[in-house]
Amino acid sequence: MKLMRNLTAVFLLTLIVSSCGPQDGVYFVNLTDGQEVSSSVLVEMGVNGMEIEPAGEVSKGVGHHHIIIDGGFLPTGETIPADKTHIHYGKGQTEATIELTPGEHTLTLQFANGLHQSYGEQWSKTITVNVID
């Protein structure tokens, strides 16, 4: 009887876990927090819960990626500047190569709408990488 109860509990837990999909938000496909990288870094960008679309129009549930080098997320609705540390991927790109100087850097992946207005912290992900060459 106890074995049946344990098997039932394992089965229910398996059903619950398998029914949970990936969490909404952005993520680095090929990089992890604390990873050592070379100065030329390939960044693969992913998103769950929204669709990728080039910049231009504002549509619900769509947007595009930005990488912020050595900075954090931008508050919801704030326009992401375009400069050497705020890189826009307004054509809907999901991968890019960026150049970093040796040492520790933070990379923040920020999702934004068609007018480059941030979707806020919940649609951002920050990791630290260490450039070793």
Image (spheres, rainbow, N blue to C red):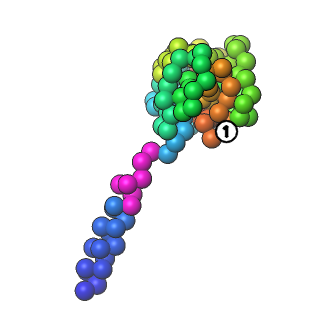
Residue tagged 1? 121
Q: Position of residue 90 (x, y in %)?
A: 57, 16
Residue at image point 73% right, 18% down: 81
Q: Position of residue 33 (x, y in %)?
A: 56, 37
Left or right: 82 as drawn, with respect to 32: right
Quadrant where the C terminus is found in the figure: top right
Left or right: 126 as drawn, with respect to 35: right
Residue at image point 52% right, 42% down: 24
Q: Foreground residue, 106 or 47? A: 47
Q: Position of residue 10 (x, y in %)?
A: 32, 69
Can see residue 123?
yes
Residue 58: in magenta span: no
- Point out the residue furthest to the bottom here: 1
Can see residue 39?
no
The three-letter code of the residue at mark 1 reads: Glu
- Magenta span: 16-22
Residue at image point 53% right, 17% down: 54
Residue 57: name its quadrant.
top right
Q: Position of residue 93 (x, y in %)?
A: 49, 18
Residue at image point 34% right, 73% down: 9
